[in-house]
Each structure stands twice: as C-alpha cells, then as structure tokens.
Amino acid sequence: MLNKIFIKIGSLIVIIIGLNFIYSYTLYENDLAEKCEQIIEIQNSQASTDIFYFGESSNFNVRENDSIKKYISEITGLFFPSLKLTTINKAATHAGIYKYWIKQIDVNDHKPKAVIVTLNMRSFDAAWINSKLETQLQESIVLVQSYPNLINRFLLSLQAFDNKIEQQRESAMLKDWSTTQLKFPYTFKYKTVREWDNAMGQGSFLREDGSWDSEKITLACHYIKGYAFNISENNPRIKDFDEIANWCNKNEINLYLNLMAENIEYADSLVGKELVFLMKQNRDFLVKRYSKNNCTVVDNLEKVDGLEFTDQTWTTEHYGYKGRMIIAKNLADSLRKQFSKQYKKAY
C-alpha cells in the first residue's frame, strides 16, 4: 500500500514538473508580456544595458507645449553618450514593484554598472499605499514570484495576491488619516491628517468679498493629505527600498535613488511651515538611511520652482521641460562620480 502511495505521489510530481516545463517554454512568455511587459523589456535589453532607470510617470510625463519632450532618463543619457541607459517605466509604480523588476536582472549574464530607482516621497503616504491602482500592480508581479512558473500561473488564476477591492483600500486610507498621529518636535494643534484637513477645509482662504476661495482650499487640502506624514521604519515602502538596497549591495551594483522634486513653494504658501517641515524631515530620513555602501540618494526635493510643475491644481511629480532638465542634470552630476570618463557636458 505504501509503495502504491509513493508511486502515485512520485508520478504526480513528475507530471507537475513536466507540465511546468511545457508551460515555461510555451505560454509563459505570452502571459508575462500581457501582465508585466516591463519584465520582458528587462530581459530583452539586459545584454546591452550599462544603466537601468526604473521610473513611474514622473519620468515620462511631459507638457503639451514643451519644445523638447525628452524624459528625465533620456536627458540624463545625453550626458553619457557612450553608455546604454535603458528606461523601464510604468505609471503609479513604487518600490514594492521595483524590487521585483530588479531581481529579474541576471547578474550572472550581464551585470549593469548602475541601477537608478525613482524615489517618490508621496509613495510613502496612505493614499498611494492604498491606491485603487494597487490591485493591478500586484497582479503584474504574480508571475515572477519565487515559485515554479506553473504554480504562479495557478495563483494568478485564483487571484491569490493582494486583491482588495477599492472600498477596502479607501477604508484603510481613511483610517490611517484619522488615527495615525503626526509627530513634531514642538506642539502643533492638529494631531492627525483628518484634523488638519478638516480645519483647512473650513474657510481657510477667503476672496476679497469674504466668500470662500474653494479652489485654494481644495488644493491646500490635497497638499495636507499628500505630504502630512512621518516616514518611519514601519512604513512598507521602507522595507521595499531596504530590499532593493540590500540586493544591489549584495550584487555589487551601484544604486542611485532619484528623489523627486516636490512643490515646496506651494506647500509653504498654501499650508505653511509645518507641512514643509514634515517634507524636509522625511527627505532627511531617506538621505540618512540610504546614503551608505554603494547607494547614493540624489536629492531633488527643493530643486524645481512651483510654476515648473505641470499640475497646478494637484500634487504630482510632473514637470515641464525645465524641471525635467534640472532633475536630469542633478542625477547626471551624481553619476559623473562613477562615470567620469564617459561624461560629456550636454547642457
């Protein structure tokens, strides 16, 4: 009886291995291209790539009236014409996805000389962590989990991933805004984002006739919800960036975290010094934590003027050409320390 059981189990294992082999060499690439084309791009470009640039919409968003519509990564590449800089983009992407992309780099095949990863401060906030786009992002990396390809496909068909509905994510976001205590080194009258947002929404800006300036009030509230938080070790994005930094360090690949510019000017004029303090404190936390080993934090936080932001009624890291050029040049200056011989002045 035991022999029969072992034979059946062994046969089942052999069948699964065989099916996994067949799937891996037939349908897997098509499924991967459908769910996460960025992985295919990494695999197809690795052999010729010197530098990978991983980014979200901050990299590729351009203004309609821009005379030059090059991405931040493309402008950066102009400073190093003899190097192949490969850009991998996807809107709303964050470190929790980048870490899977990076691990698709086969260091035993052709190791890149450097990896640039977009460091977006808002990706640490409750709204982005609980974004309605998160389910789609999580679905995109199921096929590259550390299981056999056939098992990953089975998990995908069962939707066995972080597959919360929008209402669940919104509820988590609202709970964070209502319960997480804001920390200042001095007394501040608002304890949570919800308290601060509610106060700002109660006629904080008035027109000359005494009526509420709804546009300014709405924008100020967006800034509070987008930037009023304290980054700590418990933030899931910190754990993701730690994983990225550790992987690059282990594989002896220089890592550049490209910290995006935020509209400090509008944050100050619309909300005030307390919000600016939080933004700068979070920047300092990130710079201190990751400026070690083979990692460089490229600090662009205060580099771009308010009018250079494409979205004037929302909080995004989208810039006109001048803003993209400023960030690209700052990044190129950091890369120049590693690639001094390949550097050519482009602007």
Image (spheres, rainbow, N blue to C red):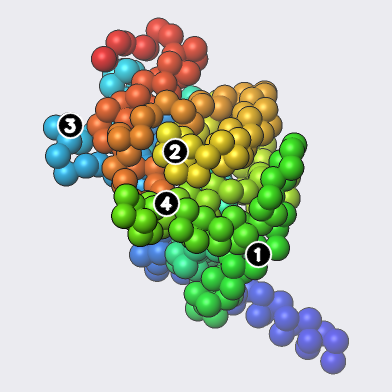
CA gap between label 3 and label 2 equals 30 Å
Numbered disc in front, either 4 or 3: 4
Tell me which amino acid carries mark 4.
Answer: Phe
Q: Quadrant of the C terminus?
A: top left
The answer to the question of whether label 2 and label 4 lie on touching residues, with beta carbons closer than 8 A, is no
Residue 82 lies in quadrant: top left
The answer to the question of whether label 1 and label 4 lie on touching residues, with beta carbons closer than 8 A, is no
Q: Is residue 128 above or below residue 258?
A: below
Residue nearer the viewer, 331 or 316: 316
Numbered disc in front, either 1 or 4: 4
In the picture of the structure, the residue carrying the numbered disc 2 is 269
Residue 233, percent from left and from top = 73, 45
Of the numbered discs in the image, which one, if any, rests on residue 205? 4
CA gap between label 3 and label 1 equals 43 Å
CA gap between label 2 and label 1 equals 25 Å
Numbered disc in front, either 3 or 1: 1
Residue 264, percent from left and from top = 46, 35
The answer to the question of whether label 2 and label 1 lie on touching residues, with beta carbons closer than 8 A, is no
Whether residue 129 is visible here, answered yes or no, is no
What secondary structure is found at the residue carrying circle 3?
A: loop
In the picture of the structure, the residue carrying the numbered disc 1 is 178
Residue nearer the viewer, 231 or 70: 231
Residue at the front extreme of this rendering: 209
Numbered disc in front, either 3 or 2: 2
The answer to the question of whether label 3 and label 2 lie on touching residues, with beta carbons closer than 8 A, is no
Residue shown at the point (74%, 42%) measured from the top left: 187
What secondary structure is found at the residue carrying circle 4?
A: loop
Q: Is residue 159 left or right of residue 69?
A: right
CA gap between label 2 and label 4 equals 11 Å
Tell me which amino acid carries mark 3.
Answer: Ile
Residue 206, percent from left and from top = 39, 53
Q: Is residue 65 left or right of residue 33?
A: left
